[in-house]
Image: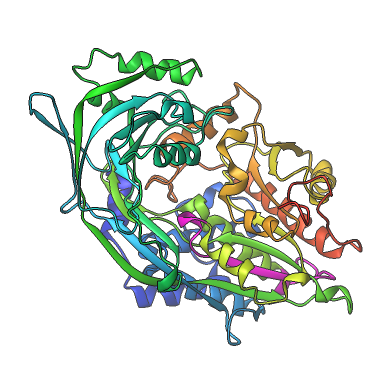
Amino acid sequence: MNRMQGFRREFRFPRALWLALALAAPLVAQAQQHLRDGEIHDTDTLAWWHTTVALSDDSMEGRDTGSAAYQRAADYVAKRFKAAGLSPAGEDGGYFQTVPMHEIAVVPEGTRFTLVGPQGAETTLKFLQQITIAPAENLAANIEGALTFRGYCGKDAMADVTGKIVVCFGTQREGLPSGSVRAANARAGGALGLINVDDPYFTIEPPRWPYAYARSVTLRVPQGEKAAAAPLLSMRVSAEAFATLLAGSGQDAAAILKQGGAKQPLPNFEILSTLRVQIHVTQRDISSANIIAKLPGSDAKLKNEFVVIGAHLDGYGFGTPVNGDNLYNGTLDDAAYVALLIQTADDLKAHRLRVPKRSILFIAFTGEEKGLLGSRWFVDHPTVPAGQLAADVNLDQLRPLFPLNILTAEALGDTTLGATARAVAAPMHIEIRPDTEPERNLLARADQYPFLGIHVPAISFIFGYDPNTEAERRYREWYQIRYHRPQDDITQPMDFAAAAKFNTFFYRLTLTIANDAGRPAIYPTSSFAAGKH
Protein backbone atom coordinates (compact mmCIF):
# COMPACT_ATOMS: atom_id res chain seq x y z
CA MET A 1 0.00 0.00 0.00
CA ASN A 2 1.45 3.36 -0.96
CA ARG A 3 1.42 6.39 1.33
CA MET A 4 -1.66 7.95 -0.27
CA GLN A 5 -3.57 4.69 -0.03
CA GLY A 6 -2.57 4.41 3.63
CA PHE A 7 -3.78 7.94 4.28
CA ARG A 8 -7.10 7.22 2.58
CA ARG A 9 -7.62 4.00 4.55
CA GLU A 10 -6.71 5.50 7.94
CA PHE A 11 -8.67 8.72 7.85
CA ARG A 12 -12.39 8.56 7.04
CA PHE A 13 -15.31 10.80 7.86
CA PRO A 14 -18.21 9.24 9.74
CA ARG A 15 -20.64 8.25 7.00
CA ALA A 16 -23.48 10.53 8.08
CA LEU A 17 -21.17 13.55 8.25
CA TRP A 18 -19.56 12.67 4.93
CA LEU A 19 -22.92 12.33 3.18
CA ALA A 20 -24.11 15.67 4.54
CA LEU A 21 -20.95 17.36 3.28
CA ALA A 22 -21.15 15.61 -0.08
CA LEU A 23 -24.73 16.71 -0.66
CA ALA A 24 -23.69 20.28 -0.01
CA ALA A 25 -21.06 20.08 -2.76
CA PRO A 26 -22.90 22.26 -5.31
CA LEU A 27 -22.97 25.13 -2.79
CA VAL A 28 -19.43 24.91 -1.44
CA ALA A 29 -17.46 23.44 -4.34
CA GLN A 30 -15.22 26.44 -4.65
CA ALA A 31 -14.59 26.61 -0.90
CA GLN A 32 -13.53 22.96 -0.60
CA GLN A 33 -9.96 22.05 -1.32
CA HIS A 34 -9.11 18.72 -2.91
CA LEU A 35 -5.77 17.13 -3.48
CA ARG A 36 -5.65 17.92 -7.22
CA ASP A 37 -7.39 21.28 -7.46
CA GLY A 38 -4.17 22.93 -8.64
CA GLU A 39 -4.21 20.76 -11.79
CA ILE A 40 -7.64 22.05 -12.88
CA HIS A 41 -8.02 25.48 -14.47
CA ASP A 42 -11.76 26.00 -15.00
CA THR A 43 -14.65 26.00 -12.58
CA ASP A 44 -16.85 23.54 -14.49
CA THR A 45 -14.16 20.84 -14.53
CA LEU A 46 -13.34 21.58 -10.90
CA ALA A 47 -16.96 21.01 -9.85
CA TRP A 48 -17.13 17.83 -11.97
CA TRP A 49 -13.96 16.52 -10.34
CA HIS A 50 -15.21 17.27 -6.83
CA THR A 51 -18.30 15.16 -7.56
CA THR A 52 -16.08 12.43 -8.99
CA VAL A 53 -14.06 12.45 -5.77
CA ALA A 54 -17.25 12.18 -3.70
CA LEU A 55 -18.53 9.21 -5.69
CA SER A 56 -15.22 7.32 -5.67
CA ASP A 57 -14.19 8.17 -2.13
CA ASP A 58 -13.30 5.22 0.11
CA SER A 59 -16.49 5.82 2.08
CA MET A 60 -18.44 4.73 -1.00
CA GLU A 61 -16.61 1.37 -0.79
CA GLY A 62 -16.47 0.89 -4.54
CA ARG A 63 -20.28 0.98 -5.03
CA ASP A 64 -20.67 -2.77 -5.56
CA THR A 65 -24.05 -3.77 -7.01
CA GLY A 66 -26.59 -4.59 -4.32
CA SER A 67 -24.43 -3.34 -1.44
CA ALA A 68 -25.31 -0.78 1.22
CA ALA A 69 -22.48 1.34 -0.15
CA TYR A 70 -24.08 1.30 -3.61
CA GLN A 71 -27.33 2.52 -2.09
CA ARG A 72 -25.47 5.36 -0.35
CA ALA A 73 -24.09 6.37 -3.73
CA ALA A 74 -27.55 6.06 -5.31
CA ASP A 75 -29.03 8.28 -2.59
CA TYR A 76 -26.30 10.83 -3.27
CA VAL A 77 -27.00 10.84 -7.01
CA ALA A 78 -30.76 11.13 -6.51
CA LYS A 79 -30.32 14.08 -4.13
CA ARG A 80 -27.98 15.80 -6.58
CA PHE A 81 -30.48 15.26 -9.40
CA LYS A 82 -33.22 16.72 -7.23
CA ALA A 83 -31.06 19.69 -6.21
CA ALA A 84 -30.42 20.39 -9.90
CA GLY A 85 -34.16 20.64 -10.53
CA LEU A 86 -34.62 17.35 -12.37
CA SER A 87 -37.95 15.60 -11.98
CA PRO A 88 -38.09 11.99 -10.76
CA ALA A 89 -38.56 9.46 -13.57
CA GLY A 90 -38.23 6.16 -11.77
CA GLU A 91 -40.93 3.99 -10.22
CA ASP A 92 -43.82 5.21 -8.09
CA GLY A 93 -43.02 8.87 -8.58
CA GLY A 94 -39.46 8.55 -7.27
CA TYR A 95 -35.94 8.60 -8.67
CA PHE A 96 -35.25 4.88 -8.28
CA GLN A 97 -36.04 1.86 -10.43
CA THR A 98 -35.50 -1.35 -8.48
CA VAL A 99 -33.72 -4.10 -10.40
CA PRO A 100 -34.21 -7.60 -8.89
CA MET A 101 -31.09 -9.79 -9.08
CA HIS A 102 -29.68 -13.11 -7.99
CA GLU A 103 -26.07 -13.45 -6.85
CA ILE A 104 -23.99 -16.64 -6.90
CA ALA A 105 -20.47 -16.55 -5.49
CA VAL A 106 -17.66 -19.06 -5.20
CA VAL A 107 -15.97 -18.01 -1.98
CA PRO A 108 -12.32 -18.68 -1.12
CA GLU A 109 -13.13 -20.41 2.17
CA GLY A 110 -13.71 -24.05 1.30
CA THR A 111 -12.67 -23.67 -2.36
CA ARG A 112 -9.59 -25.47 -3.64
CA PHE A 113 -8.13 -26.38 -7.04
CA THR A 114 -5.65 -29.25 -6.85
CA LEU A 115 -3.58 -30.64 -9.70
CA VAL A 116 -2.94 -34.34 -9.12
CA GLY A 117 0.03 -35.79 -11.00
CA PRO A 118 0.26 -39.34 -12.38
CA GLN A 119 2.21 -40.45 -9.30
CA GLY A 120 -0.25 -38.78 -6.94
CA ALA A 121 1.77 -35.62 -6.26
CA GLU A 122 -0.51 -32.65 -5.55
CA THR A 123 -0.05 -29.01 -6.55
CA THR A 124 -2.49 -26.34 -5.42
CA LEU A 125 -3.42 -23.63 -7.93
CA LYS A 126 -4.04 -20.30 -6.21
CA PHE A 127 -7.69 -19.31 -6.45
CA LEU A 128 -8.17 -15.83 -7.96
CA GLN A 129 -4.40 -15.52 -8.42
CA GLN A 130 -3.82 -18.31 -10.98
CA ILE A 131 -7.24 -19.84 -11.54
CA THR A 132 -10.83 -18.66 -11.33
CA ILE A 133 -14.23 -20.17 -12.01
CA ALA A 134 -17.54 -18.92 -13.38
CA PRO A 135 -20.15 -19.30 -10.62
CA ALA A 136 -23.37 -20.98 -11.65
CA GLU A 137 -26.33 -22.67 -10.04
CA ASN A 138 -26.12 -26.40 -9.39
CA LEU A 139 -22.34 -26.61 -9.56
CA ALA A 140 -21.19 -29.83 -7.94
CA ALA A 141 -19.21 -29.22 -4.74
CA ASN A 142 -16.55 -31.81 -5.67
CA ILE A 143 -15.41 -32.64 -9.18
CA GLU A 144 -12.32 -34.42 -10.50
CA GLY A 145 -11.49 -35.07 -14.12
CA ALA A 146 -8.69 -35.91 -16.50
CA LEU A 147 -7.26 -32.98 -18.44
CA THR A 148 -7.00 -32.84 -22.22
CA PHE A 149 -5.65 -29.99 -24.33
CA ARG A 150 -7.67 -29.35 -27.51
CA GLY A 151 -6.07 -26.26 -29.04
CA TYR A 152 -8.64 -23.62 -29.97
CA CYS A 153 -11.44 -26.08 -29.07
CA GLY A 154 -13.17 -26.06 -32.40
CA LYS A 155 -15.96 -28.55 -32.93
CA ASP A 156 -13.70 -30.97 -34.78
CA ALA A 157 -11.31 -31.14 -31.80
CA MET A 158 -13.91 -32.44 -29.37
CA ALA A 159 -13.74 -36.18 -30.02
CA ASP A 160 -13.34 -38.38 -26.91
CA VAL A 161 -13.73 -35.61 -24.33
CA THR A 162 -16.66 -37.14 -22.45
CA GLY A 163 -16.11 -36.82 -18.70
CA LYS A 164 -12.87 -34.88 -19.14
CA ILE A 165 -11.89 -31.29 -18.43
CA VAL A 166 -11.01 -29.69 -21.74
CA VAL A 167 -8.20 -27.12 -21.78
CA CYS A 168 -8.49 -24.50 -24.54
CA PHE A 169 -6.36 -21.63 -25.73
CA GLY A 170 -8.64 -18.76 -24.69
CA THR A 171 -8.35 -16.63 -27.78
CA GLN A 172 -10.44 -13.54 -28.53
CA ARG A 173 -9.09 -13.23 -32.05
CA GLU A 174 -11.24 -12.94 -35.13
CA GLY A 175 -11.68 -16.11 -37.15
CA LEU A 176 -11.16 -18.48 -34.21
CA PRO A 177 -13.77 -20.01 -31.87
CA SER A 178 -15.10 -17.50 -29.36
CA GLY A 179 -15.54 -18.25 -25.68
CA SER A 180 -19.21 -19.09 -26.12
CA VAL A 181 -18.42 -21.36 -29.08
CA ARG A 182 -15.69 -23.16 -27.14
CA ALA A 183 -18.12 -23.76 -24.29
CA ALA A 184 -20.83 -25.01 -26.64
CA ASN A 185 -18.40 -27.39 -28.34
CA ALA A 186 -17.19 -28.76 -25.00
CA ARG A 187 -20.75 -29.24 -23.77
CA ALA A 188 -21.77 -30.97 -27.00
CA GLY A 189 -18.80 -33.31 -26.63
CA GLY A 190 -19.87 -34.33 -23.14
CA ALA A 191 -16.99 -32.63 -21.34
CA LEU A 192 -17.11 -32.33 -17.57
CA GLY A 193 -15.53 -28.89 -17.60
CA LEU A 194 -13.62 -26.31 -19.58
CA ILE A 195 -10.45 -24.34 -18.80
CA ASN A 196 -9.62 -21.31 -20.91
CA VAL A 197 -5.92 -20.39 -20.91
CA ASP A 198 -4.96 -16.72 -21.10
CA ASP A 199 -3.57 -15.39 -24.36
CA PRO A 200 -0.58 -13.36 -23.14
CA TYR A 201 -0.05 -12.03 -26.66
CA PHE A 202 -3.45 -10.31 -26.78
CA THR A 203 -1.81 -7.02 -25.90
CA ILE A 204 -4.71 -4.74 -26.86
CA GLU A 205 -6.36 -5.88 -23.63
CA PRO A 206 -3.92 -8.03 -21.69
CA PRO A 207 -4.98 -10.66 -19.14
CA ARG A 208 -5.22 -9.25 -15.62
CA TRP A 209 -4.63 -11.11 -12.38
CA PRO A 210 -5.74 -11.31 -9.66
CA TYR A 211 -9.47 -11.48 -10.19
CA ALA A 212 -11.37 -9.36 -7.69
CA TYR A 213 -13.69 -12.26 -6.86
CA ALA A 214 -15.65 -15.11 -8.46
CA ARG A 215 -19.17 -13.76 -8.38
CA SER A 216 -22.02 -13.89 -10.87
CA VAL A 217 -25.04 -11.59 -10.68
CA THR A 218 -27.99 -12.08 -13.01
CA LEU A 219 -31.45 -10.65 -13.34
CA ARG A 220 -33.75 -12.61 -11.08
CA VAL A 221 -36.11 -14.98 -12.84
CA PRO A 222 -39.15 -16.82 -11.45
CA GLN A 223 -38.22 -20.03 -9.63
CA GLY A 224 -39.86 -22.26 -12.21
CA GLU A 225 -37.73 -20.85 -15.01
CA LYS A 226 -34.37 -21.68 -13.43
CA ALA A 227 -32.30 -24.37 -15.10
CA ALA A 228 -32.06 -27.59 -13.10
CA ALA A 229 -29.32 -29.32 -15.12
CA ALA A 230 -25.73 -29.32 -13.88
CA PRO A 231 -23.80 -26.63 -15.76
CA LEU A 232 -20.48 -27.01 -17.54
CA LEU A 233 -17.68 -26.23 -15.12
CA SER A 234 -16.04 -23.14 -16.70
CA MET A 235 -12.62 -21.98 -15.49
CA ARG A 236 -9.77 -19.70 -16.55
CA VAL A 237 -6.07 -20.04 -15.80
CA SER A 238 -3.10 -17.72 -16.18
CA ALA A 239 -0.21 -18.42 -18.51
CA GLU A 240 1.86 -19.24 -15.43
CA ALA A 241 -0.69 -21.81 -14.27
CA PHE A 242 -0.81 -23.34 -17.77
CA ALA A 243 2.86 -24.17 -17.45
CA THR A 244 2.05 -25.88 -14.15
CA LEU A 245 -0.71 -27.92 -15.84
CA LEU A 246 1.75 -29.18 -18.45
CA ALA A 247 4.63 -29.92 -16.06
CA GLY A 248 6.03 -33.38 -16.78
CA SER A 249 3.99 -33.80 -19.96
CA GLY A 250 6.84 -33.17 -22.37
CA GLN A 251 4.90 -30.26 -23.86
CA ASP A 252 6.34 -26.73 -24.07
CA ALA A 253 3.76 -24.37 -22.56
CA ALA A 254 5.58 -21.22 -23.70
CA ALA A 255 5.80 -22.47 -27.29
CA ILE A 256 2.08 -23.35 -27.33
CA LEU A 257 1.13 -19.91 -26.03
CA LYS A 258 3.31 -18.26 -28.65
CA GLN A 259 1.74 -20.34 -31.43
CA GLY A 260 -1.75 -19.52 -30.18
CA GLY A 261 -0.91 -15.83 -29.95
CA ALA A 262 0.09 -15.95 -33.62
CA LYS A 263 -3.06 -17.90 -34.64
CA GLN A 264 -0.93 -20.86 -35.74
CA PRO A 265 -2.18 -24.45 -35.61
CA LEU A 266 -2.12 -25.98 -32.14
CA PRO A 267 -1.71 -29.63 -31.13
CA ASN A 268 -4.22 -31.81 -29.31
CA PHE A 269 -2.87 -34.02 -26.53
CA GLU A 270 -3.75 -35.63 -23.22
CA ILE A 271 -2.40 -34.07 -20.04
CA LEU A 272 -1.15 -36.65 -17.57
CA SER A 273 -2.57 -34.91 -14.50
CA THR A 274 -6.14 -34.63 -13.26
CA LEU A 275 -7.76 -31.59 -11.69
CA ARG A 276 -9.64 -31.92 -8.40
CA VAL A 277 -12.06 -29.05 -7.79
CA GLN A 278 -13.69 -28.36 -4.44
CA ILE A 279 -15.94 -25.32 -4.35
CA HIS A 280 -17.98 -23.49 -1.76
CA VAL A 281 -20.92 -21.68 -3.36
CA THR A 282 -23.18 -19.11 -1.73
CA GLN A 283 -26.36 -17.65 -3.21
CA ARG A 284 -28.72 -14.84 -2.35
CA ASP A 285 -31.36 -12.63 -3.90
CA ILE A 286 -30.42 -8.96 -4.00
CA SER A 287 -31.74 -5.80 -5.58
CA SER A 288 -30.14 -2.60 -6.74
CA ALA A 289 -31.50 0.60 -8.24
CA ASN A 290 -31.16 2.57 -11.42
CA ILE A 291 -31.42 6.31 -10.68
CA ILE A 292 -33.62 8.04 -13.28
CA ALA A 293 -34.51 11.72 -13.64
CA LYS A 294 -35.80 13.92 -16.44
CA LEU A 295 -35.61 17.47 -17.70
CA PRO A 296 -38.69 18.41 -19.78
CA GLY A 297 -37.88 19.86 -23.17
CA SER A 298 -38.86 23.36 -24.26
CA ASP A 299 -40.67 22.48 -27.49
CA ALA A 300 -44.37 21.64 -27.26
CA LYS A 301 -44.03 18.72 -29.66
CA LEU A 302 -40.44 17.51 -29.30
CA LYS A 303 -40.57 17.42 -25.51
CA ASN A 304 -42.45 14.14 -25.85
CA GLU A 305 -39.22 12.57 -27.13
CA PHE A 306 -36.33 11.76 -24.80
CA VAL A 307 -32.58 11.83 -25.32
CA VAL A 308 -31.12 9.39 -22.79
CA ILE A 309 -27.76 10.26 -21.28
CA GLY A 310 -26.42 7.48 -19.10
CA ALA A 311 -23.46 6.14 -17.15
CA HIS A 312 -23.11 3.26 -14.71
CA LEU A 313 -22.85 3.92 -11.00
CA ASP A 314 -21.76 0.47 -9.88
CA GLY A 315 -18.18 -0.62 -9.41
CA TYR A 316 -16.46 -3.71 -7.99
CA GLY A 317 -16.38 -2.89 -4.28
CA PHE A 318 -13.96 -4.88 -2.15
CA GLY A 319 -11.96 -7.67 -3.77
CA THR A 320 -8.63 -9.47 -3.92
CA PRO A 321 -5.86 -7.07 -2.83
CA VAL A 322 -3.49 -5.65 -5.44
CA ASN A 323 -0.32 -4.13 -4.00
CA GLY A 324 -1.94 -4.17 -0.58
CA ASP A 325 -5.13 -2.34 -1.62
CA ASN A 326 -8.41 -4.29 -1.67
CA LEU A 327 -10.85 -1.45 -2.47
CA TYR A 328 -11.75 -1.07 -6.14
CA ASN A 329 -12.84 2.59 -6.14
CA GLY A 330 -13.81 2.78 -9.84
CA THR A 331 -12.95 6.44 -10.37
CA LEU A 332 -12.83 6.43 -14.18
CA ASP A 333 -15.01 3.33 -14.39
CA ASP A 334 -17.44 4.95 -13.98
CA ALA A 335 -17.79 7.47 -11.12
CA ALA A 336 -16.38 10.29 -13.22
CA TYR A 337 -19.12 9.96 -15.80
CA VAL A 338 -22.00 9.69 -13.37
CA ALA A 339 -20.45 12.92 -12.08
CA LEU A 340 -20.69 14.32 -15.61
CA LEU A 341 -24.42 13.58 -15.68
CA ILE A 342 -24.73 15.53 -12.44
CA GLN A 343 -22.61 18.37 -13.79
CA THR A 344 -24.78 18.54 -16.92
CA ALA A 345 -27.86 18.90 -14.70
CA ASP A 346 -26.17 21.57 -12.58
CA ASP A 347 -25.17 23.53 -15.69
CA LEU A 348 -28.69 23.39 -17.05
CA LYS A 349 -30.11 24.65 -13.76
CA ALA A 350 -27.56 27.49 -13.66
CA HIS A 351 -28.37 28.41 -17.30
CA ARG A 352 -24.79 27.72 -18.38
CA LEU A 353 -26.52 25.33 -20.79
CA ARG A 354 -29.87 26.11 -22.39
CA VAL A 355 -32.79 23.74 -21.93
CA PRO A 356 -33.18 21.94 -25.29
CA LYS A 357 -36.30 21.21 -27.29
CA ARG A 358 -36.39 17.49 -26.55
CA SER A 359 -36.55 16.18 -23.02
CA ILE A 360 -33.46 14.63 -21.47
CA LEU A 361 -33.60 11.42 -19.46
CA PHE A 362 -30.69 11.08 -17.02
CA ILE A 363 -29.94 7.49 -15.96
CA ALA A 364 -27.26 6.21 -13.59
CA PHE A 365 -27.37 2.46 -14.21
CA THR A 366 -26.71 -0.32 -11.75
CA GLY A 367 -25.16 -3.70 -12.48
CA GLU A 368 -23.18 -2.76 -15.58
CA GLU A 369 -20.10 -4.58 -14.32
CA LYS A 370 -22.20 -7.69 -13.73
CA GLY A 371 -23.51 -7.84 -17.30
CA LEU A 372 -25.39 -4.62 -18.22
CA LEU A 373 -28.13 -5.61 -15.78
CA GLY A 374 -29.53 -2.14 -15.08
CA SER A 375 -29.72 -1.09 -18.72
CA ARG A 376 -31.16 -4.44 -19.77
CA TRP A 377 -33.83 -4.12 -17.08
CA PHE A 378 -34.62 -0.55 -18.11
CA VAL A 379 -35.15 -1.30 -21.80
CA ASP A 380 -37.43 -4.19 -20.82
CA HIS A 381 -39.24 -2.06 -18.22
CA PRO A 382 -38.91 1.55 -19.44
CA THR A 383 -40.23 4.22 -17.09
CA VAL A 384 -41.20 6.35 -20.09
CA PRO A 385 -42.77 4.85 -23.23
CA ALA A 386 -40.09 3.06 -25.23
CA GLY A 387 -41.35 4.62 -28.44
CA GLN A 388 -40.45 8.04 -27.06
CA LEU A 389 -36.75 7.18 -26.59
CA ALA A 390 -35.12 9.11 -29.42
CA ALA A 391 -31.45 8.41 -28.70
CA ASP A 392 -28.97 7.19 -26.11
CA VAL A 393 -25.53 8.68 -25.43
CA ASN A 394 -23.60 6.43 -23.06
CA LEU A 395 -20.64 7.52 -20.94
CA ASP A 396 -18.27 4.66 -20.19
CA GLN A 397 -14.86 3.37 -21.28
CA LEU A 398 -13.56 6.98 -21.22
CA ARG A 399 -9.99 7.48 -20.09
CA PRO A 400 -8.76 11.16 -20.11
CA LEU A 401 -5.10 10.23 -19.82
CA PHE A 402 -3.66 12.25 -22.72
CA PRO A 403 -4.64 15.18 -24.97
CA LEU A 404 -8.00 14.72 -26.68
CA ASN A 405 -7.58 14.80 -30.44
CA ILE A 406 -9.28 11.52 -31.37
CA LEU A 407 -12.43 9.76 -30.17
CA THR A 408 -13.32 6.22 -31.16
CA ALA A 409 -17.09 5.86 -31.43
CA GLU A 410 -18.98 2.61 -30.98
CA ALA A 411 -21.82 2.00 -33.47
CA LEU A 412 -20.45 4.93 -35.48
CA GLY A 413 -21.80 3.68 -38.81
CA ASP A 414 -25.03 2.23 -37.50
CA THR A 415 -27.00 5.41 -36.81
CA THR A 416 -27.23 9.07 -37.77
CA LEU A 417 -25.65 9.90 -34.40
CA GLY A 418 -22.27 9.18 -35.95
CA ALA A 419 -22.63 12.06 -38.41
CA THR A 420 -23.95 14.32 -35.65
CA ALA A 421 -20.96 13.50 -33.46
CA ARG A 422 -18.56 14.28 -36.29
CA ALA A 423 -20.28 17.61 -36.95
CA VAL A 424 -19.99 18.57 -33.27
CA ALA A 425 -16.39 17.35 -32.98
CA ALA A 426 -14.97 18.99 -36.09
CA PRO A 427 -14.89 22.62 -34.81
CA MET A 428 -13.29 21.31 -31.61
CA HIS A 429 -10.51 19.66 -33.66
CA ILE A 430 -11.54 16.19 -32.53
CA GLU A 431 -11.46 13.40 -35.09
CA ILE A 432 -14.14 10.72 -34.73
CA ARG A 433 -12.97 7.26 -35.79
CA PRO A 434 -14.57 3.81 -35.91
CA ASP A 435 -13.43 1.06 -33.57
CA THR A 436 -10.20 -0.49 -34.87
CA GLU A 437 -10.12 -3.28 -32.26
CA PRO A 438 -13.36 -5.23 -32.84
CA GLU A 439 -11.92 -8.32 -31.11
CA ARG A 440 -12.50 -6.57 -27.78
CA ASN A 441 -16.25 -6.39 -28.48
CA LEU A 442 -16.51 -3.07 -26.64
CA LEU A 443 -19.83 -2.22 -28.30
CA ALA A 444 -21.56 -5.08 -26.52
CA ARG A 445 -19.79 -4.50 -23.21
CA ALA A 446 -21.42 -1.23 -22.15
CA ASP A 447 -24.89 0.14 -21.49
CA GLN A 448 -25.56 1.51 -24.98
CA TYR A 449 -25.93 -2.03 -26.28
CA PRO A 450 -29.40 -2.87 -24.86
CA PHE A 451 -30.76 0.36 -26.38
CA LEU A 452 -29.56 -0.66 -29.83
CA GLY A 453 -31.25 -4.01 -29.21
CA ILE A 454 -34.65 -2.26 -29.03
CA HIS A 455 -33.79 -0.13 -32.08
CA VAL A 456 -32.97 3.10 -30.21
CA PRO A 457 -30.05 4.92 -31.87
CA ALA A 458 -27.11 4.89 -29.46
CA ILE A 459 -23.48 5.93 -29.38
CA SER A 460 -20.54 5.85 -26.97
CA PHE A 461 -16.94 7.01 -27.08
CA ILE A 462 -13.39 5.98 -26.17
CA PHE A 463 -10.35 8.26 -26.07
CA GLY A 464 -8.45 7.40 -29.26
CA TYR A 465 -4.81 7.52 -30.30
CA ASP A 466 -2.47 6.85 -33.18
CA PRO A 467 -0.34 3.69 -33.05
CA ASN A 468 3.08 3.82 -31.40
CA THR A 469 2.50 7.12 -29.63
CA GLU A 470 2.73 8.25 -26.03
CA ALA A 471 -1.06 8.35 -26.00
CA GLU A 472 -1.23 4.66 -26.89
CA ARG A 473 1.38 3.83 -24.25
CA ARG A 474 -0.69 5.56 -21.56
CA TYR A 475 -3.87 3.89 -22.75
CA ARG A 476 -2.34 0.39 -22.73
CA GLU A 477 -0.74 1.00 -19.35
CA TRP A 478 -4.11 1.97 -17.88
CA TYR A 479 -5.67 -1.30 -19.00
CA GLN A 480 -2.72 -3.27 -17.73
CA ILE A 481 -2.48 -1.81 -14.23
CA ARG A 482 -5.76 0.04 -13.43
CA TYR A 483 -8.69 -1.48 -15.31
CA HIS A 484 -10.98 -3.18 -12.76
CA ARG A 485 -8.29 -2.77 -10.12
CA PRO A 486 -7.92 -0.74 -6.92
CA GLN A 487 -5.48 1.52 -8.77
CA ASP A 488 -8.40 3.15 -10.61
CA ASP A 489 -8.69 5.79 -7.90
CA ILE A 490 -8.46 9.57 -7.50
CA THR A 491 -4.64 9.55 -7.33
CA GLN A 492 -4.09 8.11 -10.84
CA PRO A 493 -2.55 10.10 -13.71
CA MET A 494 -5.09 12.37 -15.42
CA ASP A 495 -5.12 14.95 -18.19
CA PHE A 496 -7.68 17.41 -16.84
CA ALA A 497 -7.55 19.57 -19.97
CA ALA A 498 -8.56 16.52 -22.01
CA ALA A 499 -11.32 15.77 -19.52
CA ALA A 500 -12.61 19.33 -19.82
CA LYS A 501 -12.55 19.12 -23.61
CA PHE A 502 -14.52 15.88 -23.60
CA ASN A 503 -17.05 17.26 -21.15
CA THR A 504 -17.62 20.24 -23.45
CA PHE A 505 -17.98 17.90 -26.42
CA PHE A 506 -20.56 15.89 -24.51
CA TYR A 507 -22.60 18.97 -23.57
CA ARG A 508 -22.63 20.15 -27.18
CA LEU A 509 -23.46 16.72 -28.58
CA THR A 510 -26.33 16.18 -26.14
CA LEU A 511 -27.87 19.57 -26.89
CA THR A 512 -27.39 19.18 -30.65
CA ILE A 513 -29.24 15.86 -30.63
CA ALA A 514 -31.95 17.26 -28.37
CA ASN A 515 -32.48 20.37 -30.53
CA ASP A 516 -32.32 18.76 -33.97
CA ALA A 517 -35.66 18.88 -35.78
CA GLY A 518 -34.93 15.46 -37.26
CA ARG A 519 -35.17 12.46 -34.95
CA PRO A 520 -32.06 10.24 -34.89
CA ALA A 521 -32.38 7.03 -36.86
CA ILE A 522 -30.75 3.66 -37.31
CA TYR A 523 -29.63 3.06 -40.88
CA PRO A 524 -31.52 0.27 -42.69
CA THR A 525 -28.18 -1.43 -43.41
CA SER A 526 -27.35 -1.76 -39.71
CA SER A 527 -27.75 -5.08 -37.94
CA PHE A 528 -29.68 -3.11 -35.29
CA ALA A 529 -32.35 -1.93 -37.72
CA ALA A 530 -35.89 -3.07 -36.96
CA GLY A 531 -36.44 -6.60 -38.20
CA LYS A 532 -32.72 -7.47 -38.16
CA HIS A 533 -31.84 -7.73 -34.49
Residues in magenta, as a range = 348-371
| Residue at position x 22%, y 25% in the image | 244
353 on left or right of 464: right
User: Was residue 370 drawn as part of the magenta stretch in this picture?
Assistant: yes
Q: Which quadrant holds the N terminus?
A: top left
345 on left or right of 231: right
Looking at the image, which residue sits at the far left? 120
| Residue at position x 39%, y 16% in the image | 267
Up-down: is 288 above or below 155? below
27 on left or right of 464: left
Query: Residue 382's spot in the image, x, y percent?
Result: 65, 73
| Residue at position x 60%, y 56% in the image | 447
Q: Nearer the viewer, residue 282 or 328?
A: 282
Location of residue 507 (image quadrant): bottom right
Query: Residue 279's spot in the image, x, y percent?
Result: 21, 51
Q: Nearer the viewer, residue 338 or 156?
A: 156
Query: Residue 126's spot in the image, x, y percent?
Result: 21, 38
Q: Is residue 318 visible?
A: yes
